[in-house]
Amino acid sequence: MSEDQKICNILVVDDETYNLEAVERALRFQNGYTFQVYKTTSPLQALQMVREEQIHIIISDQRMKEMSGVEMLNQVSRLSPNTVRIILTAYTDRNDLLDAINVGKVYRYLTKPWNAEDLRMVVKDAVDYYALIHRNQTLTEELTRTIEELQESNKELKKLDDLKNRFMVVASHELRTPATIITSSLELLNNSAHQLDPQMKRVLHTALKGAYRLNEVLETLFEIVEANSQKLILNPVVVNLVDLFNLLLGRMAEQLNIRQLNIKMVFEENLMVLGDRHKLYQVFENLISNAIKYTPDGGHISIRGERLNGCIRITVQDTGAGIPSEELQRIFETFYQLENLNYHHSSRYDYLGGGSGLGLSLCKSIIKAHQGKIWAESEGIQKGSTFYVELPAYHADSAGAK
Ligand code: ADP
């Protein structure tokens, strides 16, 4: 039934012409729809009409010479399952009724002599029923289409993800050797830099800086590939986190100064974990360099270390750019960055310096390999961010203590 035009096609079948006219007369009422009434005395012709026209409702007599109403409605149910079927019969015989329901799959059953008011009520209900079926069908079709589209997109995403993983494997393996050759050649040249004029020296210096950065990115990529293929190898030793952070902050003091950032460190004593010192250093270096990078000059960074239910929790909190809540999980995905890549430049400590989008992904793999947890919280954009790392605490009597 067209919702725009609200035209409802009703086919009436009865081998008595005056009965057809009586039904037509009874249907001259307003229901928000225009009823287009088709009439025939022949069930066979009725079936032909169902094939050719879109019939929304069919009203049929039961006793007809060519074929019974129930038999015809049974065929209609196969030809046009959505057509709502109503039968009129002189008998209220129980078998007739069961036949009508089981064979004719009728929606309603009206006994003769019917009165116009009853017929109108039944037709009114049938119209609503048809509209409901139609709406459900449209929704089901839409849902099926959406599911198919989602499945397609999912396949595409999987393909892209596979490509990304393959690219990471190829890049990390194939580019490492040439990058090392370039770096060592530039270092060799740099050893004789005193022979070069100042302009060439500057060029060489820039090239060397770029080569170091390239090596760093490739190294991170290589480690992520290793971690993804469960090949991340840890060299566990007892690590004193207070010492590790003192070393780290000592090395970052210059950058903190340049950016005029205030740093506060509050650590409980003896925070020990059993872990890979170099890799844990990488994790916390990344968190602090991010805090520096995403906090404007003059901001605050606070680092806390505490013991909490058998774990050690490290918290790195800044007063910087903040992270929208819907991105808090995604920032740990490989290559994921919040910034618009069109404005991308890469720097480790400049405000909003940008990077490779690899750091947090590697942090997550390393912390996972240590049976720990890492997550981020933020009140939103410009409201600062807090990164948490939890690692199993080391006790002198722990198994495997070194
Ligand atoms: P990048 O090299 O781009 O910094 P990361 O994997 O370390 O890569 O971080 C992923 C993204 O998470 C960053 O691009 C940045 O958008 C966001 N992010 C990380 N740390 C912070 C922070 N402290 N404050 C705000 N945003 C952050």
Image: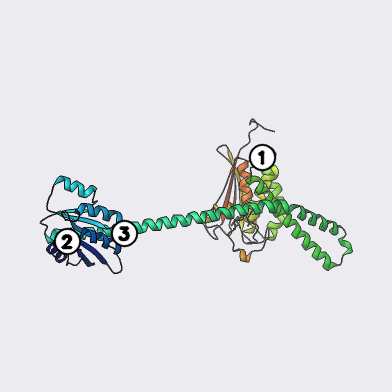
Q: Which residue is mark 1?
A: 275
Q: Which residue is mark 2?
A: 120
How packed mark 3 is, by other alpha carbons closer than 10 Å (few <14, some 14-19, many 20 or more), is some
Pick whichever of labels 3 and 2 is earlier in the sequence.
2
How packed mark 2 is, by other alpha carbons closer than 10 Å (few <14, some 14-19, many 20 or more), is some
Q: Amino acid at mark 3?
A: His
Q: Which mark is residue 157?
A: none
Q: Secondary structure at mark 2?
A: helix
Which residue, as the protein is rendered here, is positioned at the far front?
Answer: 66
Q: Amino acid at mark 2?
A: Arg
Viewer-side label of 1, 2: 2
Which residue, as the protein is rendered here, is positioned at the far left?
Answer: 113
* Rendering quarter of residue 69: bottom left
The CA distance from mark 3 to mark 2 is 21 Å
Q: Which residue is mark 3?
A: 134
Placement of 164 over or under 368, stated as above or below = below
